[in-house]
Image (tube, grey):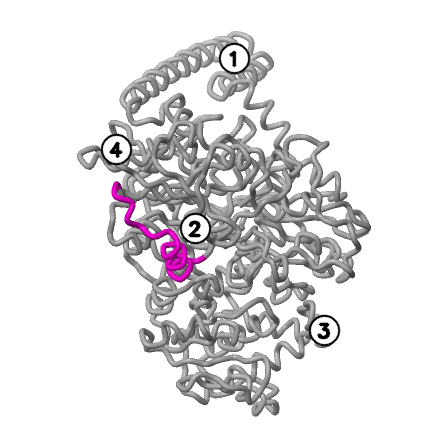
């Protein structure tokens, strides 16, 4: 059902100071227990109180899990008739099959009508009526096939459960829509119900609903007094902490739209994210003062620095927000002279990367926030008394909407963490008495790799939910940690093609009903596996994929329907690129996910791969066009190709840059330093290849595919190869290093 999520940057390398794992680095480590049970991680088994947690910067939002080997996706596309060369043949075959089936149906119907009419005429209704029933059954068997009845029988419970949850969701949405309530209005209801219940808890903070509301009201009071009003946009760049929620919640009471900035962003990406949303101000934590300082001259937005202490120095042009907050402690209610936000007004922008390059600000309205948070609540049967654990960043949909929404909308308690810790995951769940925990795929792998502890099975977790849990480790994860249920979902922050696995089916990211697919109109259509471009028939319309056939996942757009509407991005031109028109009939529209999925006979859906010029690494979507531009600039404008390569036992694809540099002029030390300044950790290339020749007359797409197939294998590549070390430098990739990477001895 409803679930939205956009990718976010999870990191995985050891920092010498605090064991923090950084996505820009590789680390020499131990094979994770993915293939053989006898493999063991050699991390120290000392008790947590004496051992620092292994920490990982995690951004949790649009991770998709790989159900099939992505290397096979292209060939699968051709086998399934989705390759460009097979388009005409496939269309002809489909048309022939359709005509044959139609002829059989007409023939069967004609015979059935004649037989029933004769029996009714000569023997009356006592014979005619049974004959009519038999005729109807025969017609259904001919048109649907006997397998349809079998599939309907084995999936009815699943579909009815989901349908009932969907009905409850729509009833709730309709009720709030009629009352024109905002997210802050619903939160206020929960404040009134249980003001002294813990709303959000972390390692260092524990705030009740009353405290969170009072903080939000002070924020509203300050920014109202500074002249900000409904419809204005203010950017927020802050780490996971209770104040993060309080700030955007307070701004929402004024009708101000908060742009939630990915804290990994730097330089051009950061400036773009602030300017594309037309932000009038930027609120940032003191941890990001240096990052903001480096781009301050390029920003027109007013700056508010939020320090950990009052009366602490801020940059000359910035306001000291913490001190301003301290002077507004008397405020206990929101300002009265404000324009109340409406149910369908914009609430926030959540940034997502895609095939067009720089981050795009996806629109989240009050109604969509409600739909996402309530959708997963009903679909997975959450309860208001549940305590949730999420170490995912709050600036993305997974942590900031799906988990935090349970507190704001349903009065639950949510435990957060500044940075994800694999060794501290279940100990945190025990500490906070959590009943539901959130994950993304990489996290599950890291947790499974930790040594057994007393917390593995002593928690009260009744369910984990998230996306990207690999089928290869799914069963072992739930067995080791005694997890009764997994709620795997798939979706995009901006999209309407969001699905949910509600019945624990291993590896499935969701399902589409084979009985009543019209209720939630999502489909898999035939498309070019490389570009994601839909393949159309002679009539100009798209073609649906059959079971076990890979294609692009889409969601039908229906304006005014909260579950089917596509709100798009702050940049309207970017929105149009995600819409397909004339899909199954002239004039209809659908959201293009950009992902290849496949379905089985029962309607379960499985992720295959991403399409186009985007790959996924450390929980983030990485745009090759954006990375190519930065690499080329740093390499003195040399021809550059960037692509993702598979590393055994590693989630997603690692970035690799092929640079045309026959004279070897690039200074690797300077290159590494400049890359660290120009790109977020997850976007920096993990491998470099220096090309000595390049076919500039060949098509760019084909050349990239050829390079990607060769990967980082020195056994087949004659060019110089380098890999990124834990220290952030690039070292020569020898055959020995290659073997160690593939064996899991060197991890990224």
Element assignment for label 3: loop
Element assignment for label 4: loop
Instruction: Tell me: 415 left or right of 724.
Output: right
Element assignment for label 1: helix
Please report the residue visible at 59 percent of the width from the left and 79 percent of the height from the top.
308
Please report the residue visible at 45 percent of the width from the left and 39 percent of the height from the top.
733
Disc number for residue 194 = 3
Determine contact: label 4, label 1, CB under 8 Å. no
Nearer to the camera, 701 or 100: 701
316 to 295, vertically: above or below:
below
Query: Is 678 in the magenta?
Result: yes
Disc number for residue 495 = 2
Query: Where residue 133 appears, x then y in whole percent?
Result: 56, 18
Q: Which region is colored magenta? A: 662-680
Bin the neighbour count of mark 4 within 10 Å (Cα to Cα): few under 14, some 14-19, many 20 and up: few
732 to 316, vertically: above or below:
above
Please report the residue visible at 42 percent of the width from the left and 80 percent of the height from the top.
303
Disc 3 versus disc 4: distance between alpha carbons? 57 Å
Determine contact: label 1, label 3, CB under 8 Å. no
Query: Where residue 464 appears, x then y in whole percent?
Result: 67, 48
In terms of sequence position, does the residue under pointer 2 or pointer 1 come before the other? 1
Can you identify the residue that label 1 sits on? 120
Disc 2 versus disc 1: distance between alpha carbons? 54 Å
Residue 31 appears in view = yes
Disc 3 versus disc 2: distance between alpha carbons? 34 Å
Can you identify the residue that label 4 sits on? 540
In terms of sequence position, does the residue under pointer 4 or pointer 1 come before the other? 1
- Determine the residue located farthest toward the left in the rendered image: 697
Nearer to the camera, 586 or 312: 312
Nearer to the camera, 28 or 583: 28
Q: Which circle, 3 or 2, is nearer the viewer?
A: 2
């Amino acid at each position: 059902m409803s679930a939205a999520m956009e990718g976010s940057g999870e990191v995985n390398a050891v920092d010498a100071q605090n064991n923090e794992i950084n996505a820009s680095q590789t680390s020499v480590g131990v094979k994770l227990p993915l293939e053989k049970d006898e493999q063991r991680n050699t991390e120290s088994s000392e008790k947590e109180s004496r051992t620092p947690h292994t920490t990982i910067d995690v951004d949790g939002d649009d991770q998709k899990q790989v159900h099939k080997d992505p290397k096979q996706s292209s060939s699968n596309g051709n086998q399934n008739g989705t390759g460009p060369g097979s388009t005409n043949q496939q269309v002809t075959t489909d048309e022939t099959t359709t005509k044959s089936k139609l002829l059989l149906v007409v023939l069967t119907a004609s015979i059935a009508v004649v037989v029933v009419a004769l029996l009714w005429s000569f023997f009356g209704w006592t014979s005619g009526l049974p004959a009519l029933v038999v005729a109807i059954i025969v017609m259904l068997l001919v048109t649907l096939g006997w397998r349809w009845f079998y599939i309907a029988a084995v999936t009815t419970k699943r579909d009815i459960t989901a349908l009932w949850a969907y009905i409850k969701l729509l009833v709730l949405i309709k009720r709030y829509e009629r009352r024109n309530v905002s997210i802050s209005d619903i939160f206020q209801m929960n404040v009134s119900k249980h003001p002294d219940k813990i709303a959000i808890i972390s390692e260092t903070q524990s705030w009740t609903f009353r405290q969170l509301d009072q903080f939000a009201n002070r924020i509203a009071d300050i920014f109202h007094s500074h002249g900000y009003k409904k419809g204005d946009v203010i950017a927020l760049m802050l780490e996971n902490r209770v104040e993060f929620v309080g700030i955007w919640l307070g701004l929402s009471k004024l009708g101000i739209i908060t742009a939630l900035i990915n804290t990994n962003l730097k330089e051009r990406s950061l400036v773009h994210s602030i300017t594309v949303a037309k932000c009038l101000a930027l609120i940032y934590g003191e941890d990001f003062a240096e990052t903001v300082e480096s781009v301050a001259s390029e920003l027109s937005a007013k700056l508010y620095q939020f320090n950990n202490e009052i009366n602490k120095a801020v940059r000359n042009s910035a306001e000291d927000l913490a001190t301003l907050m301290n002077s507004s402690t008397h405020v206990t209610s929101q300002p009265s002279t404000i324009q109340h936000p409406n149910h369908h007004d914009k609430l926030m922008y959540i940034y997502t990367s895609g095939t067009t390059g720089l981050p795009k600000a996806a629109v989240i309205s009050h109604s969509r926030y409600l739909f996402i948070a309530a959708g997963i609540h009903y679909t997975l049967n959450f309860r208001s008394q549940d305590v949730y654990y999420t170490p995912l960043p709050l600036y993305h949909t997974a942590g900031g909407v799906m988990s935090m929404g349970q507190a704001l909308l349903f009065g639950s308690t949510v435990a957060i963490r500044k940075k994800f810790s694999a060794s501290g995951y279940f100990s945190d769940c025990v500490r906070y008495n959590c009943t539901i925990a959130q994950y993304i795929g990489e996290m599950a792998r890291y947790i499974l790799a930790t040594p057994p502890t007393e917390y593995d099975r002593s928690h009260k977790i009744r369910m984990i939910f998230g996306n990207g849990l690999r089928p290869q480790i799914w069963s072992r994860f739930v067995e080791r940690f005694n997890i009764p249920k997994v709620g795997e979902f798939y979706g995009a922050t901006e999209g309407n093609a969001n699905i949910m696995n509600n019945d624990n089916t291993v590896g499935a990211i969701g399902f589409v009903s084979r009985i009543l697919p019209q209720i939630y109109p999502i489909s898999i259509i035939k498309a070019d596996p490389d570009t994601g471009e839909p393949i159309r028939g002679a009539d100009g319309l798209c073609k649906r994929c059959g079971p076990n056939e890979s294609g692009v996942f889409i969601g039908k757009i229906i304006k005014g329907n909260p579950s089917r509407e596509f709100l798009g991005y702050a940049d309207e031109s970017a929105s149009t690129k995600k819409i397909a028109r004339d899909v199954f009939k002239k004039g209809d529209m659908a959201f293009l996910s950009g992902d290849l999925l496949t379905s089985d006979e029962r309607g379960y859906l499985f992720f295959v791969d991403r399409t186009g010029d985007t790959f996924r690494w450390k929980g983030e979507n990485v745009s090759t066009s954006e990375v190519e531009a930065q690499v080329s600039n740093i390499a003195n404008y040399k021809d550059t190709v960037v692509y993702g390569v598979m590393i055994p036992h590693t989630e997603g694809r690692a970035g690799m840059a092929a640079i045309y540099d026959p004279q070897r002029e690039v200074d690797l030390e300077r290159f590494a330093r400049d890359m660290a300044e120009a790109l977020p950790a997850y976007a920096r290339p993990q491998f470099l290849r220096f090309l000595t020749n390049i076919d500039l007359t060949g098509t760019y797409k084909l050349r990239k595919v050829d390079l990607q197939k060769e990967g980082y294998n020195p056994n087949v590549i004659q060019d110089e190869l380098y890999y990124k070390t834990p220290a952030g430098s690039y070292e020569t990739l020898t055959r020995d290093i290659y073997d160690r990477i593939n064996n899991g001895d060197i991890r990224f």
